[in-house]
Image (spheres, rainbow, N blue to C red):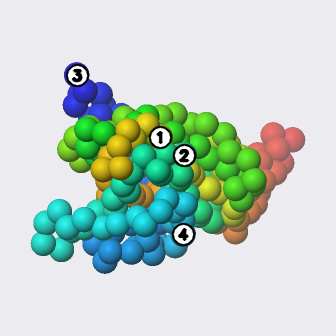
Amino acid sequence: MYRAFIVSILLGSVVSQAGGAVIAAWDFDDGDLLVDTGSGTLGSTASSPGFVVDAPGDKSLQILSSGNNGRSLTISVDLSAFYDPVMTFSARRNATGFRPNAVSFSADGGLTFTPAGTFNPASFFSGWTFNLDDADALDGNPASQIRITLAGATSTTGSVGFDEFAIVAIPVPEPTGVLLWLAGALIALSHRSLRTR
Ligand SMILES: [Ca+2]
Ligand SMILES: [Ca+2]
């Protein structure tokens, strides 16, 4: 059931994101929070985020300890030429690790946040998708932020791991393209009205 649910939400996002572009992505394989594909920033208020080697050449981000309950990861992206953003990532937790973790978004550069759901990671890495296509305030917004707030760790060895963060969104059509289309439509309309006279 659990697996089927994750697969179905992933498929749903693929369908709705036809034509989407990767705005920013992080694989953490280089052991830092700097963006690895596209442009954007990933900030952390958690104390000492670490990087775990999962396989040769593959690292993931790890945050440890109930002391980080309430701390957050915040992605900032410029969506001035994009709309309908989707965030995908993999996450896992250990037995005393963080859950539930909350996703929220900000359309004003981080002054205010709107809740967008929660997730409970499994003990193994599995994929999560948060489709923010209803968050219309992010469409075309250069000060868009998406935040994960950690909660529920019950020991100093409680952990959560993240990998393969991506923000995908749909490019806004080029203004010149829209203007050309409008001009063409107007010409076609005027021809038609001339012909019907
Ligand atoms: Ca990785
Ligand atoms: Ca990096």
Which image quarter holds the N terminus?
top left
Q: Seen in the image, is 48 located left or right of residue 133?
A: left
Q: Which residue is disc 2 drawn over?
A: 70
- Give the Cα distance between marks 4 and 3: 35 Å
Label 2, secondary structure: give it. Answer: loop
Task: Kindly identify which residue carries mark 4.
Answer: 41
Q: Position of residue 114 (x, y in %)?
A: 66, 40
Residue 66, placed above or below residue 120: below
Regarding mark 3 in the picture, which secondary structure is present there?
A: loop
Q: Are marks 2 and 1 in contact (CB under 8 Å)?
A: yes
- Going 59% across and 43% down the picture, which residue do you hit? 104
Q: For the residue carrying disc 1, how many other residues have a C-alpha within 10 Å: few (<14), some (14-19), or many (20+)?
A: some
Q: Earlier in the sequence, mark 4 or mark 1?
A: 4
Residue type of the residue flagged with mark 1: Ala
* Number of the front mark, 3 or 2: 2
The location of residue 66, given as percent across then percent down, is 42, 46
Q: CA distance from mark 4 to mark 2?
A: 20 Å
From the image, tell me which residue sits under label 3. 1
- Pair 1/3: label in front: 1
> Could you say where residue 64 lies in the image, as x and y percent from the top left?
36, 55
> Residue shown at 47%/34% (left/top)?
118
Q: Which corner quadrant of the image does residue 61 belong to? A: bottom left
Indicate the secondary structure of the residue bearing disc 4.
strand
Among the two numbered marks 2 and 1 on one chain, the one whose residue lies closer to the N terminus: 2
Q: Amino acid at mark 4?
A: Thr
Alpha-carbon span between mark 2 and mark 1: 6 Å
Which label sits in the foreground, 4 or 1?
1
Q: In the drawing, does residue 1 fall left or right of residue 191?
A: left
Which numbered disc, 4 or 2, marks the residue closer to the eye? 2
